[in-house]
Image: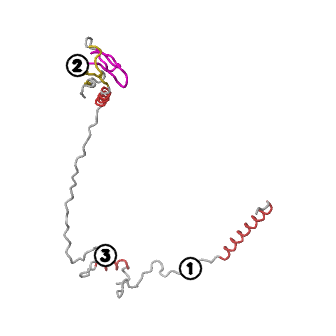
């Protein structure tokens, strides 16, 4: 249901009139505050008993002083402290002091951190072990076959391989390769000779 513009204006005017009428009605029907005279006028002193069957000692003392005097009285066998858990006539319980429990833990095994030099040496050692010593070309000039990852190299003692490895020593059934950057040496056995 949609209302036209004149209908919307009439509805708005009616709602505003209702709200104004409610405010006027509330204002004129509002109940006035009720007042009563004070029971005790300022400066008046009470002669009422503070405790049952006890009257105030006189007009010169106020009720607060009477209450404080009554609290100072000692009652035989009765403790006035409501927070105390034991009676005043009972002995205090002995405190039992327990020794703290010592927890012994095994020291955690510490793995020593490797230095950058050790990490580089391990990487060079792992790379050198990928070489294979396949054999000699001829016995006369000591040329030998090395292979690494499918590449074949013909080298002699003292030659460099792949710009970073040097053939340091050659034996009958082994070759010693050295990494020139870290000076790590690896002995490579002749393939098929049964060596590791």
Return the residue nearer the eye: 174 or 181: 174
Provide the residue span drawn in magenta.
143-170
Q: Of circles 1 and 3, which is in front?
A: 3
Looking at the rendered structure, which numbered label has been put on residue 82?
A: 3
**What element does badge 2 sit on?**
loop
Q: CA distance from mark 3 to mark 2?
A: 102 Å
Quick check: 150 left or right of 16? left
Relative image position of residue 22 (x, y in whole percent) = 69, 72
Residue ID for mark 1: 35
Rendered image quadrant of residue 168: top left
Disc nearer the start of the sequence (2/1): 1
**What element does badge 3 sit on?**
loop
Which of the image's four quarters has the C terminus?
A: top left
Quick check: 47 left or right of 83? right
Q: Is residue 104 above or below residue 23?
A: above
Main secondary structure type of the part rendered in magenta: strand
């Amino acid at each position: 249901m949609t209302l036209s513009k004149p209908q919307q204006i009439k509805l708005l005017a009616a709602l505003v009139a209702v709200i104004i009428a409610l405010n006027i009605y509330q204002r004129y029907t509002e109940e006035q505050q009720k007042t009563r005279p004070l029971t005790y006028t300022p400066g008046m002193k009470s002669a009422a008993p503070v405790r049952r069957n006890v009257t105030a000692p006189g007009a010169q003392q106020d009720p607060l002083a009477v209450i404080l005097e009554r609290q100072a009285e000692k009652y035989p066998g009765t403790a006035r402290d409501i927070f105390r858990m034991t009676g005043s006539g009972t002995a205090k319980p002995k405190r039992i002091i327990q020794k703290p429990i010592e927890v012994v833990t095994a020291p955690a095994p510490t793995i020593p951190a490797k230095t950058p030099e050790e990490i580089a040496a391990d990487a060079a050692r792992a790379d050198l072990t990928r070489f294979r010593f396949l054999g000699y070309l001829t016995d006369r000039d000591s040329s030998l076959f090395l292979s690494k990852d499918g590449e074949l190299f013909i080298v002699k003692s003292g030659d460099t391989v792949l710009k970073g490895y040097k053939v340091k020593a050659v034996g009958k059934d082994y070759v010693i390769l050295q990494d020139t950057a870290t000076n790590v040496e690896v002995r490579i056995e002749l393939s098929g000779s049964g060596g590791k």
